[in-house]
Image (cartoon, rainbow, N blue to C red):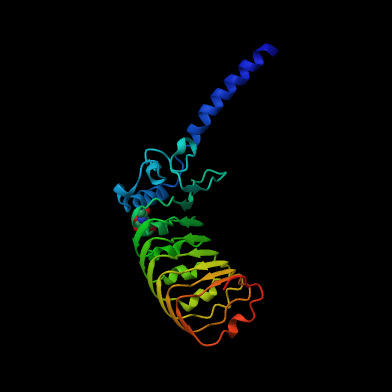
Amino acid sequence: MSKLWPLFCLLWFTVCSTSTPMLTSSQTLDADIQVLRVFKRCIDPNSIPPNSYLSSWDFAMDPCETTGGQFLGILCTFPLDDSPNRITAIDLDGVGYEGFIAAAIGNLTELTFINLRKNNFRGPIPESIANLKKLTRLSLSNNFLTGSIPLGLITLKKLEYLDISFNQFSGTIPASIGGLRGMTSLSMSNNGFTGRLPDLSGLWQLKTLDLSRNQLYGSLPNVPVSLTTLFLSNNILSGHLTPLIKLRHLKVC
Ligand SMILES: *[C@@H]1O[C@H](CO)[C@@H](O)[C@H](O)[C@H]1NC(C)=O
C-alpha cells in the first residue's frame, strides 16, 4: 500500500488541480466585463503597442483569471462565496494610449484605484466618476485632459490621493475640495486652473499640495498644518505669507 501512495497523490493532484479552475473560471461580473470592453474600445487601437498592458486584454478570456498573463493592469476581488469577481483597480502602463476615458468606468463600483498617467487621454473626466464611492487613489497626470473638475469627484469621501497634474484642465478649484478629510496628497500643477484658492484647512491629513503652474490669484488661504511639501510657484498669488507661519512640518516651499 505504501508504494501506491505517491501514485495516489499524483492522481489526486492531477484531478483536483485540473478540475478546480474549471469550476471557478469565468466568474467576473458580466457588467464589469462589458465596461472593460467599452473602456478599451475608447482607445485608438493604433496607439496600443504589442506587449502593452491593454494588448493583453483578450476578451476570449475571463479578466479576473490570473493565469497566462492576460488582462495586465487590473486587479479583482476574489470573494470566498459564490458572488462574482469585481474589478478593483485599473493600473495602466504609460505607453501613450490615445483616446477618451469611457463614461462607463462609473459602473465599476468596486474600483479603489485608477492610474492612467503618462498617456494621451483627452477630453473630460467623465461625471460618472462620482459613482466610484470606494475610490482612494486617482492618478491621471501627464495626459491631455480638459474641462473642469467634476463636482462629483470632490464628493468621494474615501479619496486619499489625487494627481491630475500636467493636463489642460481649466475652471476654478471647487470650495468643496476642503471637505476631503482623508486626502494626503493633492497635485493639480501644470494646468489652467484659475480663480482664488479655497480654504484648505479642512484637509487636516494633507501632506503634499502642489498647485504650481496655474493661473490662481488672490491671497493665500488657510492651509492645513500637516503639510510637509508645498508648491505654489508660477501663479499670480499676492498678499501675506501669514498662513504659512504655522506650518511646522514644512520641508519644501
Ligand atoms: C452602465 O450602467 C448603466 C445603468 O445601469 C447602463 O445603462 C449601462 O449600459 C452601463 N454601461 C456599460 C458599458 O455597461
Residue 134 image point, x, y percent: 52, 60
Viewport quadrant of the N terminus: top right
Q: Is residue 172 above or below residue 28?
A: below
Q: Is residue 33 above or below residue 177?
A: above
Locate residue 14 relative to residue 59 in the image: left or right: right
User: What residue sits 62% from the left and 73% below the top?
Assistant: 250
What is the x, y in percent for residue 93? Answer: 44, 50
Asked whether the viewer can see residue 29, the reply is yes
- Of residues 2 and 198, the one nearer the viewer is 198
Number of callouts = 0
- Whether residue 1 appears in this view of the structure is no
State the residue in front, 212 or 93.
212
- Extreme-right residue of the structure: 2
**Nearer to me, 144 or 105:** 144
Across and down, in percent, residue 67 comes to 48, 36
Ligand 1 quadrant in view: bottom left
Q: Nearer the viewer, residue 32 or 96?
A: 96
Q: In which quadrant is the C terminus drawn?
A: bottom right
Q: Residue furthest bottom?
A: 239
Residue 157 location, x and y as percent?
53, 67
